[in-house]
Image (cartoon, rainbow, N blue to C red):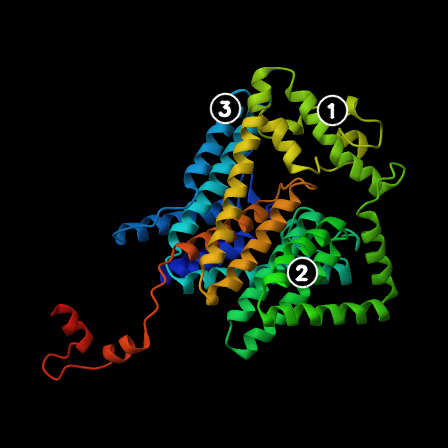
Amino acid sequence: MALILVPVFRCLKRDYHAGLALCVGLMVSMPDYLRLSFGGGIPELTIHRLLLIVLLLFWVSVSRQVPSRPAAPFLRGLFILGATQLMSLLLSVYFSGSVKSFLAFALEIVLFFMIVSTSLREREVILKVLSAVAVALGVVAVIAGIERRWEINLSQYLVLGNGDVNSEDITSTYPHRIVLGYAMAMVVPVILAVKDQEPRKKKRLVLWCLLLLAIAGCYFSNSRGPWSGLIIGTAPLIIFGSRDTKRVFVMFALLAVLVLAVRPGVRETLTAAIGSLTDKDEDSVKGNSYQYRWRLWHVAFAEIKKSPERMLFGYGGLSTETMDLSDYFERGTGGNTALTGFTSWDNQLACDLIELGFVGLAVEAGLYLGVLGTLVVIWFRSPAMDKSILLAIISACTIYLYAQSNVYLFSPQLKCLFWGLAACGLRLGQLKQAPVTAPEMELSSLESPLSGRSTLAMLRMT
């Protein structure tokens, strides 16, 4: 952890914005099992929280030197959501877990979003943060490729001392293969946007390689969710993207045809994945999983309707970890994880309903839809040079919102990824666009022989 925190500290001290980009890149890529545990119910200090503490110290120092700090967008909505979570905490059936959930929300979402969004004052800084995200998740994709090829997880080996894995369960630095797949799907449009903004050929070539690795990482997740999310999320790029972006997708289509022709195993895997998207046969594994995700809505509603306070504010954050819901399921069809082998609720929205109630779920849904809707409005009004960036951020955020319907998002990296990208898009729309006209540029370049002031400045003074 020191090998990570010391260089971050030095980078922030030398150049705050470069350090900010480095912090964001690390927070969307570092494993959450890199932590300091104290026991006794004390919250762990994960690498993400330590990075945020270091970033907070410099943010406070920099803010004092700036006369006016821009307000963080949607901060009021985050505070309202925090208030609903506080009410759920007070009514929680698992108080210690709900306290941890509330602190994680306050630190890993609210504080992170506030620091990042108020630090992005220039377009160049936003591009620097997006580039850091692209490179960091590109490294995650490299680790996933090594894991797939040699069946060793470098991250787990270096941190936990044991990196032996199954080639069918690729996780890289993420806690679960499906969450990894969604992170890879979200970074694909981001890499495309960064590549379009990069003028240097060597770096563009590196970004091309990272793009292909990210797509491969999405494939390595061995799940239909990230693939379908990637298709849904990149649809706006295909429809509204630039001519260069559309050419990239045409190239991908040709490359996909070539791979399917020469690699029968890939063809069989994708055919099975596509066929399982609508598989509703309860006797099959995929059909069972599909039915289980829908069944969770019934379970959540059946539990919260037991009392008015539960219907309004639920059972508290992380309460689903202690609730035995096996009576709602037959053996092997979901419910209690110890009984059936399911590793999570596999439906973030249904989980939020039972933990936060209708009030919390409604506020959360309104916040997410408000962020996405605002990004769309900003995209319509933005100049041409920013449209590809905003479209990429909209695509990535759409993938994140889609993921909530079919996976439990317990990864801090994925949450930081969504809110970091949202901060970049929202702040890009708030930056004042003041293009200088050609005649004004010519006037400003003229120097007065009397005082050295530009002719334009003297005319304005007159």
SS at badge 1:
loop
What label does residue 143 carry, if any? 2
Residue 454 visible in the current orientation: no
SS at badge 3:
helix
Q: Earlier in the sequence, mark 2 or mark 3?
A: 3
Q: Which residue in the protein does label 1 denote?
A: 325
Q: x, y percentage for residue 72?
A: 39, 46
Question: What residue lies at 35% left-to-right and 46% top-to-bottom?
Answer: 71
> Is 133 drawn above or below residue 293 in the view shown?
below
Q: Residue placed farthest to the left in the image? A: 450
Question: What residue lies at 58% left-to-right and 26% top-to-bottom?
Answer: 357
Q: x, y percentage for residue 391?
A: 55, 59
Q: CA distance from mark 1 to mark 3?
A: 23 Å
Residue 111 occupies quadrant: top left
What is the three-letter code of the residue carrying label 3? Met
Counting the numbered discs, the total is 3
Q: x, y percentage for residue 438?
A: 32, 77
Q: Earlier in the sequence, mark 1 or mark 2?
A: 2
> Is 250 drawn above or below residue 150 in the view shown?
below
Q: Residue placed farthest to the bottom in the image? A: 449
Q: Which residue in the protein does label 3 denote?
A: 87
What is the three-letter code of the residue carrying label 1? Leu
> Is 81 drawn above or below residue 244 in the view shown?
above
Q: CA distance from mark 1 to mark 2?
A: 37 Å
Q: x, y percentage for residue 134?
A: 56, 62
